[in-house]
Image: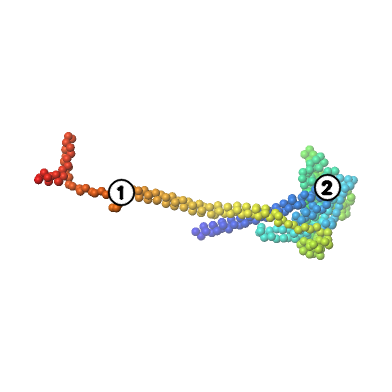
Amino acid sequence: MFKGNFMRILGYILFLAAGFILVGMFYNTASLGRVNSYYKENVFPKFKEYNENSEYLDGFITANNGFYDKTPIYTLSNNDSEASEFFFTLNIYRAKFAFRSNVLYFFPAEQVENGFIIEFKNLQYKGEDLMELDRAIDSDSVVSNRFHVYVTYDVETKQVDFPLAPSQPYASFDALMQKDDGTYAKLTSIRVDYIPPKVDGETVKAKTLLMVNNSPDLNAGDGETFIRNDLNVTKELYTIGTDEVAGVFPTEAELQNSTFSYEKLDLSKYNGSVALATSLVIVVVIIGAYFMFVHKTVMAHFQQKRTEKRLAAKREKELAQTHAQDAEFEEVDSDSPFKFEEAPVEDATIVESTEDEPVEIETDSETSEEKE
């Protein structure tokens, strides 16, 4: 009995834990979905004017709950076809983000990180506009998903490779740049490669379109590769100090005296979707708990009630039949208007007779009269 109770209690605990995790996962997913909804509604429509102004980047960083300094710490551009057929504008900005997360799914926590943003815009290759690389581009000269960016730090094993996507500026933070000894890595190079499609099934060597680093051995471009060797991004350069912004985000006064771009992220408009998704999952968990732990008991209870009801109906039927049989033999009540008198029973003598003779019954009264 003890073992049975223990296993039942253990089952309850495990189910509660699984239900908590399931609800928490959906709650967090729905919370992240608010950011996507905000981005699609308020930020992405500005992308078509990305080359003309900074409104898209402003909204992109706001959607990620951060702010940045609109004065770049590094900038480089090319629109000279003699230097390279790859046209671009490269900007690196100081930035600060407050990453929101949930401890045990439901308890909010915030981690503040300094970092930098790498932005590519005004992109063209061989006269083809590359600002739509996030979507499908496929032509004779440009094939989609063929441009890759390589970001390298002064740590041998640290290199980041990602497709060139103008609508997704690359961000790096203290947590990503911290070394094992507690110091911070330096950004040493940014490279953009074009990977041509295979020719007759043979892989074609990638072409380096842009190389920016801090190596004095590199000289100007050769018509195919645009090269610069003046890159030097360190933690001291990209960190936004407390003398500039005392808190997590700049105040109105701090914004007026700086080139920071900041807008408070407000996702309250999208809370309804979180509540709906979480409620649906809670309902599913409750239904699951019912069928796992309660349904059997409830069905047994109703089965017992049905059985008792059938037995009661059967007893009532049998009792009714018994009363009906008793009523057939019940004597008429003395107050009834219909009364019958019983004739006195006299002694009778049965006389046997033949077939031709009627049967005669002699009574004692007849015998006595004859004697007289």
Q: Earlier in the sequence, mark 1 or mark 2?
A: 2
Q: Which residue is mark 1?
A: 329
3D distance between C-alphas at marks 1 and 2 = 112 Å
Q: How many residues crowd mark 1 within 10 Å: few (<14), some (14–19), many (20+)?
A: few
Give the left or right position of residue 260, taking residue 318 as reference: right
Q: Residue furthest top?
A: 356
Q: Nearer the viewer, residue 240 or 70?
A: 70
Give the left or right position of residue 12, taking residue 356 as reference: right
Residue 172, given in percent of the width and then of the height, sits at 78, 56
Amino acid type at circle 2 is: Leu
Residue 303, given in percent of the width and then of the height, sits at 48, 51
Name the quadrant containing residue 204.
top right
Residue drawn 41% across and 49% down? 314
Q: Which residue is mark 2?
A: 123
Residue 173 visible from this viewpoint: no
At mark 2, the secondary structure is: strand
Q: What is the quadrant of the C terminus in the image? A: top left
Residue 341, given in percent of the width and then of the height, sits at 24, 49
Residue 6 visible from this viewpoint: yes
Q: Nearer the viewer, residue 147 or 255?
A: 255
Residue drawn 64% across and 54% down? 278
Residue 183, given in percent of the width and then of the height, sits at 78, 61
Between circles 1 and 2, the one closer to the viewer is 1
At mark 1, the secondary structure is: loop
Amino acid type at circle 1 is: Phe
Mark on residue 270?
A: none
Q: Residue furthest front?
A: 337
Give the left or right position of residue 254, taking residue 357 as reference: right
Residue drawn 76% across and 58% down? 264
Q: Nearer the viewer, residue 61 or 330?
A: 330
Residue drawn 59% across and 57% down? 16
